Amino acid sequence: MTKQSIAQQKPLSIHFTAPTAMFLGETLKLKVQVKHQLTKEQTGHLQFALYNAETKKSVDGWFLNFFPFQYFTTIANEIFETEFPFTVPNDYKGKFTLELVAKVDTIQDSIRIDIPTFIKQ
């Protein structure tokens, strides 16, 4: 039996490397790329949000997520790159959820990841 892999490219996709865990008080500049297969030049947006993983309530302000919304234009063969800086508060407890949503017209891609926090020893 032969194995065959099928790669499907989405018309719009978010790419980034998420941390596996973060320390309390740690600051991160999350580097994000939005790739697309669109031929028409259009304006889209990328939204970054942070939530308490247990309560599902927003922690954007507490994590100093001051730039949660970025606009981009889909130019043929170009990748949109940006950074979202945030800081895990020193007194935060538990996991947080990192969410990214990219949207152009009716085309959308999204990612949600839970990230645990630890106290620095």
Image: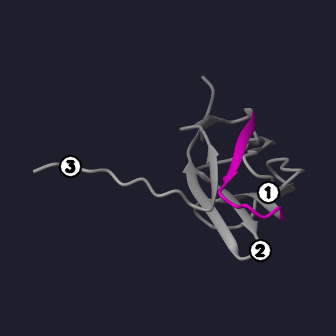
- Quick check: 119 left or right of 30? left
Q: Is residue 34 magenta?
A: yes
List x then y, in percent, for residue 74.
79, 57
Q: Is residue 39 magenta?
A: yes
Name the kind of residue labelled 2 in the image.
Asp
Examine the rendered structure and indicate whether residue 28 appears above or below residue 80. Answer: above
Identify the residue position indicated by label 1 in the image.
74
For residue 33, what is the image quadrant?
Answer: top right
Tell me the residue at 77%/74% (across/down): 105
Residue 38 figure quarter: bottom right
Q: Nearer the viewer, residue 73 or 88?
A: 73
Q: Earlier in the sequence, mark 3 or mark 1?
A: 3
What type is the residue that disc 1 sits on? Thr
The alpha-carbon separation of the residues under discs 2 and 1 comes to: 11 Å
Q: Residue at 72% of width from left, 40% of height from top?
A: 30
| Quadrant, the C terminus | top right
**Which residue sits at x=65%, y=57%?**
37
Magenta region, main secondary structure: strand
Residue 82 x %, y % = 80, 43
Q: Which amino acid type is shown beneath numbered disc 3?
A: Lys
Chain part drawn in magenta? 28-42
Q: Which residue is mark 3?
A: 3
The CA distance from mark 3 to mark 1 is 35 Å
Res. 105 mark: 2
Mark drawn on residue 62: none
Q: Residues within 10 Å of mark 3 (few under 14, many from 20)?
A: few
Label 1 residue SS: loop
Could you tell me which secondary element the residue under label 3 belongs to? loop
Tell me the distance, in whole angstroms, between the alpha carbons under discs 3 and 2: 37 Å
Q: Position of residue 46 (x, y in %)?
A: 78, 58
